[in-house]
Image (spheres, helix red, strand yellow):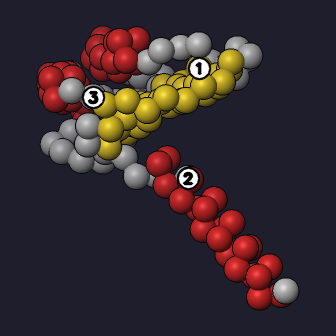
Amino acid sequence: MKRITGILFALTVLASCNSQRIYSDFDISYSRSGGLAPVYENLLIKGHDAHYSFEGQGKKYKQDFKIPQEDLNKIEHTLSRNNFRRIQEDHKKIYDHISTSVNVKKGPNEGSKTDASSIMPNYRTNWNNITDVFQELINNNVKKQ
């Protein structure tokens, strides 16, 4: 009986570890979180596969979808054209707002940026262009309930 219990426990642990893999194994991620009424929105891209999740405003949903090559090219082009790696984050403290983070783990635009503090004024247009391309991708591919 102890052996069966041990095996079931091991399988449960392995299953729970595997379910979190999607949140660490990605090429590009876009996330928004925080605010007075907390919102958590994630878009994780690995190759042509995307995982989207949203929780907030009394709603909660997840969706997986495929991203066409032209959309991936558009993301890469937007990151390059707007100098993603050179965007400077400000160090001002900002509380109770929804912050956006973009992480790129692969390619020439590899890096991580967030507007949790703020983005320096010279780079706000670049940052908005980058976040707009992700919002457009979400709006075109996610069927919100």
Mark 3 residue element = loop
> 115 or 6, which is in the foreground?
6
Name the residue tied to disc 2. Answer: 20
Q: Residues within 10 Å of mark 1 (few under 14, many from 20)?
A: some
Instruction: Specify whether residue 53 is in view.
Output: yes
Q: Mark 2 or mark 1: name the one nearer the start of the chain.
A: 2
Specify the label residue 98 is tagged with: 1
Q: What amino acid does circle 2 point to?
A: Gln
Identity of the residue furthest to the right in this view = 1
> 94 or 108, which is in the foreground?
108
Name the residue tied to disc 3. Answer: 67
> 1 or 72, which is in the foreground?
1
Q: What amino acid does circle 3 point to?
A: Ile
Residue drawn at point x = 60 percent, y = 25 percent: 61
Disc 3 to disc 2, C-alpha distance: 21 Å
> 25 or 13, which is in the foreground?
13
Instruction: Specify whether residue 110 is in view.
Output: no
Front disc: 2 or 1: 2
Q: What amino acid does circle 1 point to?
A: Ile
Residue drawn at point x = 32 percent, y = 43 percent: 46
- Compared with residue 47, is residue 76 higher up or lower down, i.e. above or below? above
Disc 1 to disc 3, C-alpha distance: 26 Å
